Structure formats: C-alpha cells, structure tokens
Image: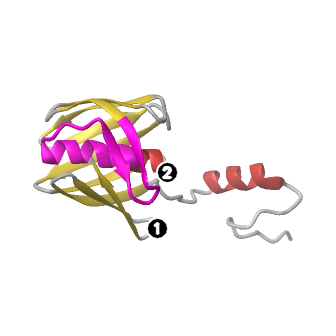
C-alpha cells in the first residue's frame, strides 16, 4: 500500500514543476499576485472616488505603477503599463466582471459606498477593501493581510 503525501510537500525527486502542478491540481490556494492587487486597487479606487489617476502607488513596494484608461459605472477599460496588459470588463449596479489579460484570469468586483469586495479566480480567493479619497486598502483573505495603495 502506498502512502499519500500531503499536497504541500513535493518529493525531492520530482522537482518544483511537479510540486506546482500537484498543488494546482489538488486545489491549493495561493494569495493574490501583486499585479492583480494593484489593478483591483486602481479600479476600485477610481470607481469609488470618482477621481482620475495615471498611476497607483504601492506602499509595500514604495513604488508607482502606471495605469491608464476609463472606469465608469458600466465599463472598465484600463491598461497596466508595468505588466503591459489590459484589464477590461463590464459593470452593472456596482458589480463588475473583469478580465486581467496579463494574468489571464477573471476577477469579480463589487463596489458600494466606500467599500468593495471581490473574488480573484486566478488565486481562488476573496478580497475586500475600502477607499478614502485617494487612499485604497485591500485585504487579502488568503494571507490575512492588508495592502495599502494610493491613486
């Protein structure tokens, strides 16, 4: 009888490719990647503040990241200059269905008042946050961590 290994332990003989593939197949959840978090902060910040912006400042990286495009109640059409990709989608009643062409995954985003919630299909995880003027805070439920941005 063979023993099943926990899915977070890769047998050394198979290397990291086996490890990553096995984790994906078994449904291991990872945290949101930085480009997705930045895009969410930019789009939610624009949608809830009503302000235009050509970048998002990531406090954890102490760095500006360029964005352009439009965010309206019914449409998102933005471009991330760092990732060299579009993030687009449609919205209705504060709910947006977005697609991040760089990460090649869908994102659901719901905005209401100064708060937002959503789901990142790439990582399989939920997020939420708040917007206060140009300040945007994103909470990643998978890492139980807050991330701060400004637009």
Residue 71, above or below 140: above
Q: Position of residue 23 (x, y in %)?
A: 65, 56
Q: Is mark 2 on a helix, strand or loop?
A: loop
- Please give the residue where the numbered disc 2 appears in the rendered image: 33
Outermost right residue:
13
Q: Residues within 10 Å of mark 2 (few under 14, many from 20)?
A: few
Instruction: From the viewer's perspective, tell me whether residue 135 is left or right of residue 93.
Output: right
For the point 77% across and 62% down, which residue is it? 10
Residue 10, above or below 34: below
- Of residue 114 and residue 8, the one placed in the foreground of this image is 114
The part of the image, by quadrant, that contains residue 78 is top left
Label 1, label 2: how many angstroms apart (C-alpha)?
A: 11 Å
What span is colored magenta in the figure? 38-66
The part of the image, by quadrant, that contains residue 1 is bottom right
Q: Position of residue 3 (x, y in %)?
A: 81, 71
Q: Which mark is residue 143?
A: 1
- Of residue 84 and residue 9, the one placed in the foreground of this image is 84
Q: Where is residue 35 in the image (x, y as percent from the top left)?
A: 45, 45
Q: Position of residue 109 (x, y in %)?
A: 27, 47
Instruction: Tell me if residue 89 can be seen.
Output: yes
Mark closer to the chain start, 1 or 2? 2
């Amino acid at each position: 009888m063979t023993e099943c290994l926990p899915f977070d332990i890769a047998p050394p003989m198979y290397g990291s490719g086996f490890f990553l593939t096995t984790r994906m197949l078994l449904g291991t959840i990872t945290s949101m990647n930085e480009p997705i978090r930045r895009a969410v902060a930019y789009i939610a910040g624009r949608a809830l503040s009503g302000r235009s912006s050509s970048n998002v400042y990531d406090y954890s990286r102490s760095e500006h990241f360029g964005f352009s495009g439009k965010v309206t109640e019914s449409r998102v059409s933005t471009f991330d200059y760092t990732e060299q990709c579009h993030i687009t989608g449609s919205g209705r009643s504060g709910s947006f269905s977005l697609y991040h062409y760089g990460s090649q995954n869908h994102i659901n985003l719901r905005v209401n008042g100064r708060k937002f919630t959503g789901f990142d299909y790439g990582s399989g995880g939920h997020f939420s946050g708040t917007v206060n003027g140009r300040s945007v805070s994103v909470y990643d439920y998978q890492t139980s961590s807050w991330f701060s941005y400004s637009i």
